[in-house]
Image (cartoon, rainbow, N blue to C red):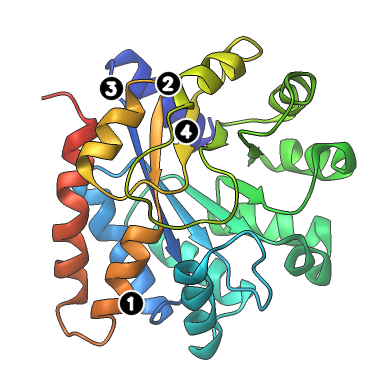
Amino acid sequence: MNRIVERFDRLKRERQKGFIVYLGAGDPNLEATRQLALAFDKLGVDVLELGVPFSDPLADGPVNQLAAQRGLESGTTPPGVLKTVAAIRTESQIPIVLYIYFNLIHRRGLERFIQEAAKAGVDGLLVLDLPPEESDGYEALMRRAGMCNIYLVAPTTPEDRIELIVKRGAGFIYYVSREGVTGMQAKVADTITQMTAKIRAHTDLPIAVGFGISTPDQAKTVVASAEAVVVGSAIVDQIARHGKAPDLIRRVSEFVKPLVAAVKRP
């Protein structure tokens, strides 16, 4: 069974909520990405999203754009990210999703990239700029490879399109809780409960809520209405601050630990 599906099945059985971390792969370098992945697994992180660096990350705010830039500067490429995933797999079975722009896949070749990702140990792809209406071939290849094609739903997505998107997704639905780009916010959006209910009317897939969540209190509030919470920019910001520190892994782990605790039942 796919690791993402397996993890959410286990969380449901244990009546627990999921915690998902987003990292810019290769920020500050791929060895740090590998070490952070292993540290997060030990902390109880349920899914790791690795952002594959891209020169024009339109869906991302300044914090994640700078992480992509640092990833590119460290020489990170899609094959390098897959090699790092394979290295993580020698020590960990944490579910891994690549957060990626379609041009990077297209350049490698759709079928080839999906096969290589599955072989490396990737469990799902979240392709930011590939709408479901244009995804027939992609979805078939993903199913054949045993990977989850994860789609985004936004606050502005009309209900008929929500229905179309969620019926074509796999693994979980990523609900973007705010309009605009990624980034930390002072408070969570007040429409999360309403929108997750609207999505749930059309699917049994778990719903993970992200964009703007940066504190344990915010994470706790969000998972009251969802199966999982995604924290990205706040963690990426910690990496930006401490990227050159010899104790980077410890510092970032200390930041993540209370976030994980906030969504887990004792």
Q: Which label sits on residue 163?
A: none
Q: Residues within 10 Å of mark 3 (few under 14, many from 20)?
A: some
Mark 2 in CB contact with mark 3 (< 8 angstroms): no
Residue beneath disc 2:
9
Q: Earlier in the sequence, mark 3 or mark 1?
A: 3
Amino acid type, label 1: Ala
The residue shown at (14%, 78%) is 247
Quadrant of the image occupied by residue 23: bottom left
Q: Earlier in the sequence, mark 2 or mark 1?
A: 2
Q: Earlier in the sequence, mark 3 or mark 4?
A: 3
Residue beneath disc 3:
16
Residue beneath disc 1:
240
The mark closer to the camera, 3 or 4, is 4
Whether 117 is drawn above or below 145: the answer is below
Amino acid type, label 2: Asp
Q: CA separation, marks 3 and 1?
A: 31 Å
Whether 250 is drawn above or below 151: the answer is below
Residue beneath disc 4:
208
Instruction: Pick the residue in front: 117 or 56.
Output: 56
Q: Residues within 10 Å of mark 1 (few under 14, many from 20)?
A: some
Mark 2 in CB contact with mark 1 (< 8 angstroms): no
Mark 3 in CB contact with mark 4 (< 8 angstroms): no
The mark closer to the camera, 2 or 1, is 1
Q: Position of residue 130 (x, y in %)?
A: 78, 49
Mark 4: which secondary structure? strand
Amino acid type, label 3: Gln
Whether 19 is drawn above or below 11: the answer is below
